[in-house]
Each structure stands twice: as structure tokens, then as C-alpha cells.
Amino acid sequence: MPFEPLDQYLQRQKKLAEIEARGYDAYPHRFDWTATPAELVEKYTPAGAAELEAAKPPVRVAGRILTLRLHGKAGFAHISGSGQRLQIYVKLDIVGSRAFELFRLLDLGDFVGVAGHLFRTKTGELTVWVSELTLLSKALLPLPEKWHGLSDVELRYRQRYLDLIANDRARGIFLRRAQIIRELRRFFDARGYIEVETPMMQPIAGGATARPFVTHHNTLDVDLYLRIAPELYLKRLVVGGLDRVYEINRNFRNEGISTAHNPEFTMLEFYQAYSDYHDLMALSEELFAHLAKQVTGSTIVKYGEYEVDFAMWQRISMREAICRYWPADAGPAPNVAELAAPGGPRAIAERYNVWAQTHNREPLPDLAGQTGGEITGLLFETVAESQLIQPTILYDFPTDISPLSKCRKDDPSLAERFEIFVAGMELGNAFSELNDPTEQERRFRQQVESGGEEVPREVDMDYIRALAHGMPPTAGEGIGIDRLTMLLTDSHSIREVILFPLLRPETPQEETAAGASNSGGHSPEPGSGGQK
RNA sequence: AGGGGCGUAGCUCAGUGGUAGAGCAGCGGCCUUUUAAGCCGAAGGUCGUGGGUUCGAUCCCCACCGCCCCUACCA
């Protein structure tokens, strides 16, 4: 099956045939190597030319050819392995005419193994003096342009492997992502948590408000939902005596795509028994500071035009945030007491909308039927969220929008819940878990009755039953790994930190061609061959 | 979903109402320490797709497709 670019594909196939005609295996099974290019570069960078000349360190090393410079009866190439380039020097006198002919048939992108020793060229570059050359795998399609790399964003996402080859930054992002996840595991493992995996396919998609994806199991003949959160299963485990659990895995939400949203995304969720949300505030601050330090070397992280310091947290209540970040020219800022008063949030929202309409701002969506707590949440998102640049713990969420949280003893309209904001992005969400089965069932029923696509159609009675068996006081938190990775890699689109972000599938060319001939309106000559 | 932008050689990009150019990659030749190697030569394009305006469209207009950005929902 040939691929575009066709001429180059065919050209390389021709070379492949020539190579095989000369008795070489283009796809051998193994090559014995002693070091990766990266290891050699690291180890011998300090070694000078004279030192190498004296020692002639023997090497066997393999990699992908990234550059190739032929000079008649000799040539240079760079091979790449483990993210580092190492130059090789192939000389007719040394390798012999048969191997040199092979060298001349190589293309960028081919994998080779070489044996020889290290030396430095005139210009001082560490290089392998090749005495043996082995083709390890023939590439039939070319690499991205070597100087500019691959910059077409769509191609970078669709053919991520090319992005990883051509762009060190892309490679670096995913190495760092792996490091972040490794450090997270280490952090929680060290604190006595156990890592678990809970269902991705769930009969009732609970634990968050979001539209789920639906799928179907044939043998059981049941519809299942891809999970929107692992929350309810993790808490079942706490009921079961796993007092500290965490899961790092995918959630799926059938909602919009943006620079901050991918339909499948990775969440860390963790739960610890005998704790409340105050404990998690402290733990979160420690976790983020530790992580930033481990991964970037500093708690101070550059993110676009901002510098955020994960060692400097502000804690602020949602109502305080609305008051503090109230637009300066939108009339007198509300105060916390006003927001707390019955009817207060609605009055303030209406005040905001009057201002928004005259200042070309998006007004709050229809307030009719919304509770005070819901309006408070909307006010926060509209007025304050994007301004929370420095690491912020935003607490005292309205109970109305926190169906899985305990309320505050002194004010049942507020939940023991906080979210973490950095650079205007929501990174985490935590609360003291509601463990009263009666109250939880009541809230679930209320949710189901209010309806909406983002709410389960039935109450998860199995979860209520689990709570009825008794759950210790527990605090839980979820952290968006993709966004966290964005922050720690200075990436400004979630697609930069997801290896294969969801894109519309490529339409086959036949399809567009068929569409063209249908809508074209000119009738082909009757009996003309070749058309389907 | 709404608004804006982009789509020209395999890649990175110029360009014009009279059917196109550069660099790199690829091909042929020369070159035994080069490194964005160099030099010589040849080749490569239904200018995203379809329709319209026009004597004539890659360029102007419309629709569609794809991607990106902003806004809306969400993490």
C-alpha cells in the first residue's frame, strides 16, 4: 500500500529493492549495542580529541538517521537515540566498498547500527569512526523538514510520531508528563495510599455533572456510560476499608473541545479517611510545591506572561473572590454579607448584567429558576475565575452546586469544598465527602428531578447502599493531570500535552472525489470507463 | 454552537485577475573531517473541494471540508 508522498515512497522502495538485491536484510531482528547515542554523548562530552585518539573507545550503537552528508568516498550522518544525536563517519577505505554502497543507499529516517570507535572531528564533534555498518530498518516515507521541523499543527497531532522526532519541545513535554505522573505516584505511595483502578464503563455515570458517552455491551445487552468520574467507586473502596486510595486514569465527557478541554482527559483522584477538606488544603499546597520543585527545579514556574509560585498560596472564599475581583467600573462592589443574604446573589447578578450589557460583556445566562448558590457560582466564574493567576485555594462553595460535599456546620448553605486555581485554570476540586446516606439520597433525588442532560437519569442506589454500610469521615480530591502538565510545561493548549488529542477523523480522498462528481452537474460521457 | 484566521511542491514559505516561485527534502553527477556541507544538472503543483462573476480565477464572491484562535459549557 503506497502512501503520499508517492514519488519518495516509490524511490525508497527502489532503494529497498537494491539493498535486498545486494544481499542485505532490510529488517533484521536484532542488533547488539553497548550504549545509546544519549549515553555516549553524556559520557564522552568531557573527553578531548587527544584522549579519544589514545583510548579509541570501542562502541556499538544504533539509531535513526536524522542527517546525511555524503562526500564522494566518505560521509557523515547523525543518528538519534534516546533523544540525543550522535554523529557517525563512514569512510570507503574503512568499511569497504560493499558496506559503502549500502551507506549510499540509506535515507533519512532509516535505522542503522554501527560498530567502531569514538573520535573527534576537526571541528571537535564527537563522532563514531565506523568500521561496520548495519541497516536495521528501512524507512519508506521521509522525515519532516530538517530545519524548520514539523510546524503544521494538525499534522503534529495526527502524526504525533513525526512531531516527537522533529520537535524536541514535543518530546520534552511528554517526558515531563511521564515524570509528573511518576512523582504523583511516589508522593501518594509514600503516604500510604494504594493505587486502584475502577470501572471506566458504568451503568450510571455519576460523580460529576457532565454529559456522558454511551456505549453498549452486547452479551449483557445493556447500555453503559463511559465514566465521567471515578468518584463514587473510589468512595465505595473507602467504605471497604481502603482508607487511602488514588486512581490516575481517564475520564470521558461528551462536551466541547477547547484549548483547556479534551473529551477524554486524565484525572488523579484520591481519598483519605478520617480527614476533612482542611487536611486536603494543606496536602494540596504541599503536593503542588513538591511537584513543581521536582519537575522544574523550582516552585516558581513560568507560564506564558505569568510567573506562578507554587510555594505561595492564597486562600479565599468564593464570596470574597467575587467581591475582590468585581470589575472596577461596574459600580460599587458587593460585600460578603450582601452575597450571603437571601436574594443577594440574584440582585448582584442583575446589577452585573446591567453593566455587562452597556460594556459589551457577556451577561450571566438566564437567572430564572437558579438558586442563590447557583448564581453565586456563576458570578464567581464570570467575575473572578480568570483572574486567579497565583495558586489559589478557593473555598466555601455553595451547597447547591456541591451535591457530594458535606455542608459547613455553621452555615448549611456552604459546602466544605474548595477548588484549586492557577493561571485562571481550574486544576483541582476537593471536599469533605458527604457520608450521610439519607442526605446523599435526598440530594441525588433532587438532582434527578431537576433533570438535564448533565445529570444521571436515575439515582445510584448501589452507592447509597454502600454509604448505608458506613463510610468514615473522608476527604477527597481530583486533579486534572493534563492541565497540571500544561502549567508545568508552559503549554497553552491541552492538545500539546495529550499525545493523541481527539480530532475529527481524516476523510478519505475517495469520498471528497465522489462528492465532487455528484454535485458537479456535468454528466460524464456515457460508457466512459474507469468511473464507478 | 457563535465570531475571527489559515489552507500554494513532500516540508517551511513567497507571490500575481492573463493557469506559479525560493530554500530544504527527493533524483542524476562531482567531492575521503562535513554539520542548515558545497558545486553542477534535471524533475516536481487540478494553488483545500465545489459553484459563481469574468474573455480569462490560484487571486474577487458564495458554499462546503479541515485545522487553529477567541467566546459559551465543563475539569
Image (tube, coloured by chain):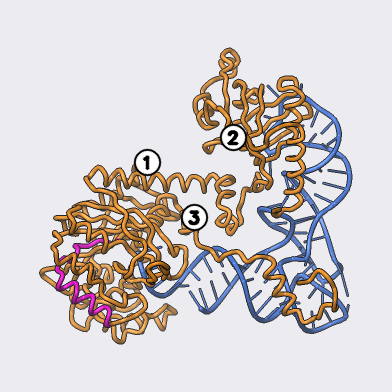
Chain colours: A orange, B blue
Secondary structure beneath dot 2 equals loop
Quick one: A227 or A368, which is closer to the camera?
Answer: A227
- Using the rendered image of the protein, determine whether residue A118 is visible from the camera's viewpoint: yes
| Amino acid residing under circle 3 | Glu
The first of marks 2 and 3 along the sequence is: 2
Q: Which residue is mark 3?
A: A496
Q: Do tags 2 and 3 sit on the same chain?
A: yes
Give, as a three-letter code, the residue at label 2: His
Magenta span main SS: helix
Expressed as whole percent of the image width and height from the top left, the position of residue A158 reads 57, 57
Left or right of B71 on screen, residue A505: right
Q: Secondary structure at mark 3?
A: helix
Q: Quadrant of residue A388?
A: bottom left
Residue A448: within the magenta? yes
Would you name the residue on which mark 1 appears? Answer: A297
Identify which residue is drawn at 69% across, 75% down: A515
Whole-angstrom CA distance, mark 1 to mark 2, is 41 Å
Name the outermost residue toward the bottom. A368
Q: Residues within 10 Å of mark 3 (few under 14, many from 20)?
A: many
Label 2 sits on residue? A29
What amino acid is labelled 1 in the image?
Answer: Gly
